[in-house]
Amino acid sequence: MQKFLEFVSGIFEVDSKELSGETSYKSIPQWTSLMHLRLVAEIEEEYGVEIPIDEVPEMKTLTDFFEYIKE
Amino acid sequence: MNILNISGIEIAGIVACLPENIIDNKADCEKLFTKETLETVIKATGIKKKAIVDAGTTALDLGVTAAKDLINNTNTSPEEIGAVICVTFTPEHLMPADALAAQYRLGLPNTTLAFDINMACSGYGYGLYIASTLVKALNKKVLLLDGDIQSAYTSKMDKSTYPVLADVGTATLLTLGNNKEDWLFSFYSDGSRIDKLMIPAGGSKYPTTIADLDYNIYEDDNKRRKIDIYMDGFEIFKFVAQDASRFIKQFMEKINHSAEEFDAFIPHQANIYMIEQLGKKLKFKPKDIWKSAGEYGNPGSASIPLTIARNANEWFSDGKGEKILLSGFGGGLSISTAKINLNKKGYYKLVQKEKGE
């Protein structure tokens, strides 16, 4: 999880200490809808997963994303 | 789900008129994002360039330019045209409709039916259906102008809208024809979500006041005026990813067509990521999904005819087929979807408005 948070901190350009699994799209201003798309695209590329489009809107916290790549 | 059926209609041609400027999106959005964020926002949306008008150019200007080229090159005389319809939410005036000025500027007879359809990104399917019914009712050709100038209503300090929205005008000419297959349409309306994508002020509910011209910072950290387009990016994303993808899938099931039975899928050009993911969800092969957003951005409902005007000649010269699935989705919230045949003998062209023309 820590490694994943560091990866995400690079995308959002924030200190990884500011992020946790609870961090949601409403809790940091950087997490806009376009950044949400970017996050999905970056995770798919980095972890070699495919997140179906209809599941993407349901992924609201970093834990939601982490659960996906863990699988 | 209602399936609306039209037979015996043919597309004589589609012309799209690009505005004066095709601008580099990255350079244009420099002030909105940090350098790294900008790189990946462009990468995530896939919108490298945007078509943007010079201030004062209208959707009707672009539509009329496209229509003149289309009329000349299909050897159509004004008397053959029974109706002109404009699909736009950015008309020249609140009243009267753009279609009246189009009738005059194109030299069409006074007997021409002329009216507008006010729809946003889903508009082309509505226009195509209504225009097709009029071709049959009037036994004449019908001209459909679809275009918007979204840049006039987009805040340069709004991260949801500014990096994607664009301007274009298009013209589609419909005639009676001998299609083997019927055209099928279906529409979806959810007015409970009108506030997710709207221009809040300037209508009769909130007539423009001086305060509406001020830029305000909103919860979503974007700065815009009340007369600018507001888009709740997450809600719209959810709408396309879930409601639209489900609705289009149900349409395909209802008309007994799998992705393989279509030659191509032409979605509204929201952004490249959405188009590709939606296409994938519907099981279309990437090569069969038509795109133009990378080069011109998202110009609203005109994105579908723009994409056809851009891609059709190359597609047909490669010997590929005519059976198309179209789908527009957006403001309303609304969806239009259709199975139609593009005419391989039709006239398809992209033109561009010259500066000061």
Image (spheres, coloured by chain):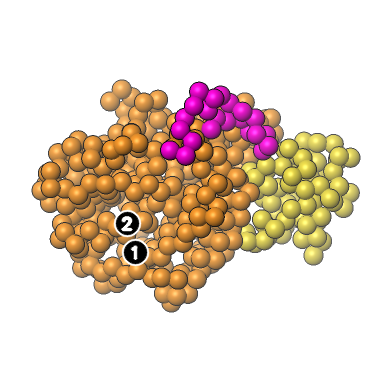
Chain colours: A yellow, B orange
User: Residue at image x 28%, y 68%?
Assistant: B6
Disc 1 marks which amino acid?
Ile
Q: Tell me the subunit letter for badge 1.
A: B
Q: Magenta part of the protein: which range? A: B204-226
User: Residue at image x 39%, y 51%?
Assistant: B123
Q: Is residue B194 among the parts visible in the rendering?
A: yes
Mark sitting earlier along the chain (1/2): 2
Quadrant location of the C terminus of chain B in the rendered image = top left
The residue carrying mark 2 is B128
The residue carrying mark 1 is B340
User: Tags 1 and 2 in contact by the CB under 8 Å rule?
Assistant: yes
Residue B36 appears left or right of B311: right
Residue B246 to residue B69: above or below = below
Q: Nearer the viewer, residue B45 or B53?
A: B53
Residue B64 appears left or right of B204: left
Q: What crowding class fits label 2: few (fewer than 14 Cα within 10 Å), some (14-19), or many (20 or more)?
A: many
Disc 2 marks which amino acid?
Leu
Residue B343 appears left or right of A15: left
Q: Tell me the subunit letter for badge 2.
A: B
